[in-house]
Amino acid sequence: SGAVARALAGTGHAVSTLSRLDLAAAAEGSMLGAYQFVEYKTNGNGKEPVGRVGLLADATNGSGDDSAVLRRAVAIAAAVRTARDLVNTPPNDLYPASFADRARQLATDAGLEVEVLDEAALAQGGYGGVLGVGGGSSRPPRLVRLRWSGGDSPRASVALVGKGITFDTGGISIKPAQNMDAMTSDMSGAAAVIATAVLAAQLELPVTVTATVPMAENMPSATAYRPGDVLRMYGGKTVEVLNTDAEGRLILADAIVRAAEDSPDYLIETSTLTGAQLVALGTRTAGVMGSDELRDRVAEHAKVTGEGGWAMPLPEELRGDLDSKLADLANITNHRWGGMLAAGVFLREFVPDELAWAHIDVAGPAFNTGKPWGYTGKGATGVPVRTLAAVLTDIAENG
């Protein structure tokens, strides 16, 4: 249905007949396939997206409330489209302060509690990772917290954490110029957890959902952090910076420690964290790491939703490769092997031992730099919103 919706651009009205069992997939696929981001096009894309799609279900197949199924599917697809809109917005317009404002507006409209920490509050709170990474930019960092209560009787509490690097030059360890424009997508994890927290409220899921979203711009300047610096993170641990382009894990470490202070039952973090994810798993399959049971649960939902995910280990021997002579740990290893896993091992250092947690590396799946396929156009994909929605629904139903 997604590919069909893309092909029907310029069509006013389309009707599809299908099994009742396919309703949700057809609705999601149609909305995602028809998605266009034309905010900065003076003449649009030439063809308007399909104006209206009618879905006719065979009443002899399946059972249940079709309208409820459709409402849920439409809400999920709308959340994915929200994440896509945020990621596709260029970094001159989406920077930490403006990103925080948009998150606040989305959350307020959905009835969520909102807290935004500016640079002064971050300094007072000791968020050394966020401040270190964001210190090179004239546009200071933020940390946003959104909370959906879960209603009267929440089944469990889930902390969501998403990486919000609004643009990543690599900092002093600057990236090559080629393809740097794609680093506008380095806040895909943040966009996904913001959209998911809002979705949880819209669906009235009986799960307390708190999103903790660090936002920073990684720029080179006279005030930028340097290779060789030691940062004191939120919670007190120290990290030696060996490469300023391994910045995402630094802001995430602060956010993970803060999120864990709420004593959630589960913590799920997602980020465009490593180029090594693409080397290991390609452009369409996220790497899922963390505590065994939750890792496998998240990876299975990623497969079922069609977003793609594969459970990966966190080898104990990699922890020694993060040892530092100056600090509690370094932000990278001194070799190229297992880079995706080493980043996961780094994050694990900031997760309480007893907490069930998962890390979803979506460096490839979050942003399509190739040709459109299925319901996925060029640019932001909205991954892993549907995976997170499926996991939250599972937790709401089964704990």
Image (tube, rainbow, N blue to C red):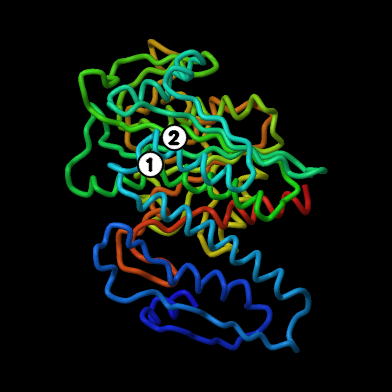
Q: From what the image shows, is residue 269 above or below residue 306?
A: above
Residue nearer the viewer, 238 or 58? 58
Residue nearer the viewer, 220 or 110? 110
In the image, farthest residue toward the left: 177
Q: From what the image shows, is residue 64 above or below residue 81?
A: below
Q: From what the image shows, is residue 108 above or below residue 352?
A: below
Looking at the rendered structure, the secondary structure element under dot 1 is: loop
| Crowd rating for badge 1 (residues with CA inside 10 Å; few <14, some 14–19, many 20+) | many
Looking at the rendered structure, the secondary structure element under dot 2 is: helix
Q: Which residue is mark 1?
A: 274
Q: Are marks 2 and 1 in contact (CB under 8 Å)?
A: yes
Tell me which amino acid carries mark 2.
Ala
Question: Can residue 312 be seen at all in this image of the molecule?
Answer: no
Residue 88: x and y in percent read 35, 53
Q: Is residue 89 left or right of residue 1?
A: left
Q: Which residue is mark 2?
A: 343
Tell me which amino acid carries mark 1.
Thr
Residue 90: x and y in percent read 30, 48
Residue nearer the viewer, 336 or 376? 376
Q: Earlier in the sequence, mark 2 or mark 1?
A: 1
Q: Is residue 115 left or right of residue 232?
A: right
Residue at left offset 66%, top offset 49%: 201
Question: Can residue 356 be seen at all in this image of the molecule?
Answer: yes
Residue at left offset 53%, top offset 64%: 306
Residue 170: x and y in percent read 27, 34
Residue at left offset 81%, top offset 43%: 152
